[in-house]
Image (cartoon, helix red, strand yellow):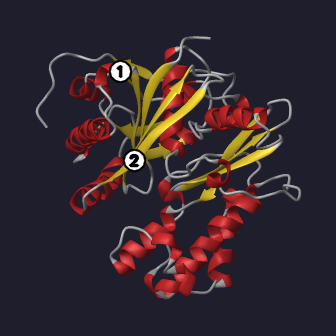
Amino acid sequence: MGRVLTAIGLMSGTSMDGIDIAVVRTDGDSIVDRGPSAGYAYDPQFRERLKQGLEDARSILKREERPGTLADIERDLTLRHALAVRMFLQENNILPDNVDVIGFHGQTVLHRPDQALTVQLGDGDLLARETGIDVVYDMRANDMAHGGQGAPLIPAYHAAMARGLSKVGEIATPVVFVNIGGISNLTYIGAGEEIVAYDSGPGNTLIDQWVEAHAGIPYDQGGMIASEGGVLRELADRYLSHPFFSAEKRRSLDRNDFAPPAAGDASLEDGARTLAHVTAAGIVRSARPPLPQARVLAAEALDLNGDSMEAEAWAYLAVRSRYGLPLTYPGTTGVSRPVSGGRVAAKHAQAESA
């Protein structure tokens, strides 16, 4: 394998609440040394622009198209990522010259796997110029070009963590990682390092949209609102009867595949509690065949960080991309064969003013 590189991962998920950053030292294979991490929230005005961007993206037919406000949003989003990187490096006393690569996810504004179309806003060349660090970006497209769903991509990192944890006796395979972001996904890692992964349903995105619309806040911190409500079974069943959960073919999800309830469907608290139930029930329902009785642990119980795991994954995947290692597999995205991916933007000396 290649030498160990220092990588920064940048993740802006479907919840559109901000930028997660993490450092990982890795060879893109078995060596994973996790470093510091942080989160930088988007300001409310920019979040509103991102929501408008989702509407503008509905008309996209080709990945390179940027209709409406999308070109301006892409530039401003990239500059916000560059500023977050500079702040993060300064706060952690890391020199840009000591970072080998940035893994840049960007902001997904459209994901239509049935049309082999996925669009993540993010200008890799601009980010490389602004940070003075090589950037790997656009890591989903090559998977789709080879028949994959373009998601989930984090399972390769889950597999690396499972190997590391099993070596020190913290866990034993088979093991399942449950990743609840805006969209939830599962990764199964068998005793022989078999890897199977898929999106399992809506994650936090419905709850976030619900409380923002009805309470004016971006998310339900600590589940405080949901804890005051009850589960409305009829509303929950409406979601859980969605064809996604019974379809023979696994498919990856777009933020718009599930819509939040109508205003009159529930009180603020009952709506939040019901949507939290839907997230958990969707995970169980998607586990086909059903999971046997298993020990359930929070990431932090294994000295992992649930808040930074996706950003860490993007750092890890960037190094795998640099070494031409697979990012996705037939068992994770339905791709025809294991494939690498990502585009490389080389650092440049001249930066643009933010």
Q: Which residue is mark 1?
A: 98
Disc 2, SS? strand
Which comes before the other along the chain, label 2 or label 1?
Answer: 2
Quadrant holding the N terminus: top right
Residue 251 visible? The answer is: yes
Disc 1 secondary structure class: helix
- Is 33 located above or below residue 299 in the figure? above
Residue 79 placed where, x, y %? 22, 38
Image coordinates of residue 262 in percent, x first then y, are 47, 79
Residue at numbered disc 2:
38
* Position of residue 10 measured from the top left corner of the image (x, y, whole percent): 40, 38
* Badge number at residue 221: none
The answer to whether residue 257 is above or below residue 344 is below
**Do labels 2 and 1 touch, CB within 8 Å?**
no
* Near-viewer residue (77 or 192): 192
Q: Residue 310 location, x and y as percent?
A: 52, 43
Residue visible at 13% across and 38% down in the picture: 354
Q: Height in image: 123 above or below 281? A: above
Looking at the image, the residue that sits furthest to the left is 353
Q: Nearer the viewer, residue 29 or 33?
A: 33
Q: Amino acid at mark 1?
A: Asn
Query: What kind of residue is marked 2?
Result: Ala
Q: Nearer the viewer, residue 128 or 309?
A: 309
Q: Which residue is rendered at x = 67% and y = 31% of the image?
A: 160
Tell me, yes or no, if residue 116 can be seen here: no
Q: Is residue 164 above or below residue 238?
A: above
